[in-house]
Amino acid sequence: MNRIKEVLEQKGIKQTWLAEKLGKSYNMVNAYAQNRQQPRLETLMDIANILDIDVKDLIISNKENN
C-alpha cells in the first residue's frame, strides 16, 4: 500500500501534473494513487523526489508500532 493519493491531496497537486513529471500516463499514476497497482521502487523514489519528500512518507508500513 502507498500514500501517493494522500500526499498529492496534502500538497494540492493533481495526478495529471505528477503523470507529466514522471513521464507516465494519467491512468498509470491513477492506478498507483488508488492502490490498484504498486509502482516499482525506482518509480516510487522518482515520485518522492518530484514531491520533495522522503520515500518513506509514501509507504504504509506493514509493521505494528509497539
Image (tube, rainbow, N blue to C red):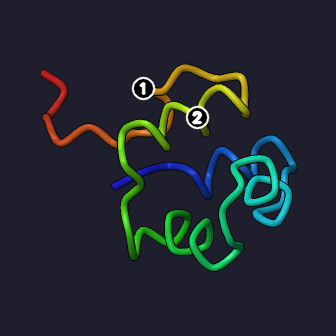
C-alpha gap between disc 1 and disc 2? 12 Å
Horizontal placement of 12 versus 51: left or right?
right
Front residue of 59/23: it is 23
- Residue drawn at point x = 72 percent, y = 33 percent: 51
**Up/down of 8 relative to 48, above or below:** below
Q: Position of residue 13 (x, y in %)?
A: 84, 51
Kind of residue at disc 2: Asp
* Dot 1 crowding, Cα within 10 Å, few <14, some 14–19, many 20+: few
Marks 1 and 2 close (CB-CB < 8 Å):
no
Chain-order first, disc 1 or disc 2: 2
* Dot 2 crowding, Cα within 10 Å, few <14, some 14–19, many 20+: some
Q: Which mark is residue 46?
A: 2
**Up/down of 32 relative to 52, above or below:** below
> How many marks can you see?
2
The residue indicated by pointer 1 is 56
Image quadrant where residue 50 sits = top right
Front residue of 16/61: it is 16
Q: Position of residue 39 (x, y in %)?
A: 41, 54
**Up/down of 51 relative to 16, above or below:** above
Report the quarter where the C terminus lies. top left
Q: Position of residue 44 (x, y in %)?
A: 48, 40
Q: Which mark is residue 25?
A: none
Image quadrant where residue 56 sits = top left
- Residue drawn at point x = 62 percent, y = 52 percent: 6
- Which of label 1 and label 2 is nearer to you? 2
Q: Position of residue 37 (x, y in %)?
A: 38, 70
Q: Secondary structure at mark 2?
A: helix
Horizontal placement of 32 versus 17: left or right?
left
- Residue drawn at point x = 68 percent, y = 71 percent: 25
Front residue of 23/14: it is 23
Kind of residue at disc 1: Lys
Question: In the image as oriented, which residue stretches furthest toward the front?
Answer: 23
